[in-house]
Amino acid sequence: MEDFPFTEAQEETAVLTANEHRIILHNDDVNTFDHVISCLVRICDQTPEQAEQCAYIVHYNGKCEVKTGSLEDLKPRCLRLLDEGLSAELV
């Protein structure tokens, strides 16, 4: 049996996600955990638990992917995070 790098379902997922963009939140020494969590809940539609986990990942790893989706959906969200003083980028 020949080994394929992707199953059919994985290949379909890879094609679907290739068109998605991501917001990456970067660590800073300015914002509090509470502010970051609040922003992620309000702006990125995360649950408080998800937002807290992302805040800790950012703190310890330096960055974290906080939202995926279309460019049209993510661009205003990323701008709002920046307006709140967070360090975020859209990729």
Image: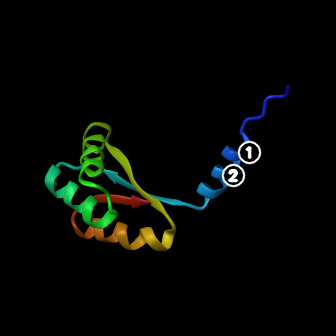
Circle 2 residues within 10 Å: few <14, some 14–19, many ≥20? few
Query: In the rendered image, which residue does mark 2 sit on?
Result: 12
The x and y percentages for residue 65 are: 40, 50
Q: Which residue shows up at 74% across the image and 45% down it?
A: 8
Which quadrant: the N terminus?
top right
Query: In the rendered image, which residue does mark 1 sit on?
Result: 8
The x and y percentages for residue 16 are: 63, 57
The CA distance from mark 2 to mark 1 is: 6 Å
Can residue 27 be seen from the camera position used here?
no
Q: Which residue shows up at 60% across the image and 61% down it?
A: 19
Q: Which residue shows up at 26% across the image and 60% down it?
A: 41
In the displayed orientation, state which residue is furthest to the right. 1
**How does the figure colour the protein chain or chains?**
rainbow
Q: Quadrant of residue 4?
A: top right
Three-letter residue code for mark 2: Glu
Judge left or right: residue 54 versus residue 34: right
Three-letter residue code for mark 1: Glu
Picture mark count: 2
The x and y percentages for residue 24 are: 39, 54
**What SS does tag 1 mark?**
helix
Tell me whether circle 2 and circle 1 mark residues in contact (CB < 8 Å): yes
Can residue 84 be seen from the camera position used here?
yes
**What SS does tag 2 mark?**
helix
Q: Quadrant of residue 90?
A: bottom left
Depicted 23 relative to depicted 14: above or below: below
Asked whether 27 or 2 is in front, the reply is: 2
